[in-house]
Each structure stands twice: as C-alpha cells, then as structure tokens.
C-alpha cells in the first residue's frame, strides 16, 4: 500500500505539471479546470513539488520495521522511475513531439512507457524491495 500511495502522489504531480502552460497547456483535466487555472501557475508548480516531497517522505516514514537497505533500494527505484530513465524522459519526448506531423507508434510507446508504465513498474518493484 505504501508504494501505491507514493506512486499515486507522483502520478498526480505529473498531471499537474503536464497541464502547465510551459508543458501541454491544458485548461481541463477530467472535465474540470486544471490546477494552474484554479490556483495559478506558481501554486500549481509548488503543489507538484509538494506531492513529490510527500511521496518520498511517505515511502521513508511508512517503513517502520523494514531493513534500512531495503528502504534505500525502494527510494532508489522511485527516483529512477521519476528521473531521466523514466517520467522525465517521457515528458521531454512528449514536449518535443508537439507539432510533429509524423509521430509513429514507437514514438508514442516510448512516451507512455516512460511516463506511465515506469511508475507502475516502480510500484511493483518497491513492493518486492520494501
């Protein structure tokens, strides 16, 4: 459960940041105004950063009685899924795909594998490690 909560916080951070004008510039998410439309861009960025921080804190503090080396491995897995091997990589390719007329299936798979699947795989790996 702790892995699922941490991953959900990070996924929500991704959605908040993805909607920002400097990313996808979306005004609606699931039929409702996006975070930056309701609270402003500055608060939306900070909300995303807070969720990232909460995710790491939750993972670290919800592991009472678990061997420290397993906690470190779980945090490492979480960082990897967010960073340049995961979510960030997918977001960079997504942003640079804007306006391209010929975006193939491989390209779209790369984006989704790195933005979404990396987080889901992370959740499974953390469950095994922590």
Image: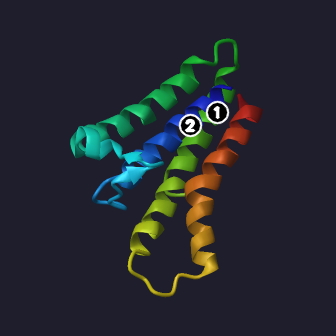
Q: Quadrant of residue 130?
A: top right
Q: Quick one: label 2, few (<14), some, or many (20+) residues within 10 Å?
A: some
How many dots with numbers? 2
Find residue 4 and name its label. 1
Q: Is residue 47 left or right of residue 82?
A: left
Looking at the image, which is closer to me, 31 or 115?
A: 31
Residue 37 place in picture, x, y as percent: 27, 46
Q: Is residue 8 left or right of residue 41?
A: right
Quadrant assignment for the N terminus: top right
Give the SS element for disc 1: helix
Looking at the image, which is closer to me, 122 or 5?
A: 5
Q: Which residue is mark 2?
A: 8
Give the residue drawn at x 45%, y 27%. Answer: 54
Contact (Cβ within 8 Å) of mark 2 with mark 1: yes
Q: Quadrant of residue 59?
A: top right
Give the residue drawn at x 38%, y 49%. Answer: 17
């Amino acid at each position: 459960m702790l892995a699922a909560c941490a991953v959900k916080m990070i996924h929500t951070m991704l959605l908040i940041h993805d909607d920002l004008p400097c990313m996808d510039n979306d005004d609606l998410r699931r039929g409702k105004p996006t975070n930056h439309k309701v609270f402003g861009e500055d608060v939306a960025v900070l909300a995303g950063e807070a969720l990232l921080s909460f995710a790491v804190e939750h993972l670290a503090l919800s592991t009472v009685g678990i061997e420290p080396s397993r906690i470190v491995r779980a945090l490492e897995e979480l960082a990897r899924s967010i960073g340049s091997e995961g979510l960030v990589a997918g977001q960079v390719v997504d942003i640079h795909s804007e306006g391209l007329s010929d975006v193939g299936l491989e390209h779209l798979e790369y984006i989704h594998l790195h933005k979404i699947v990396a987080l889901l795989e992370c959740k499974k790996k953390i469950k095994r490690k922590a």
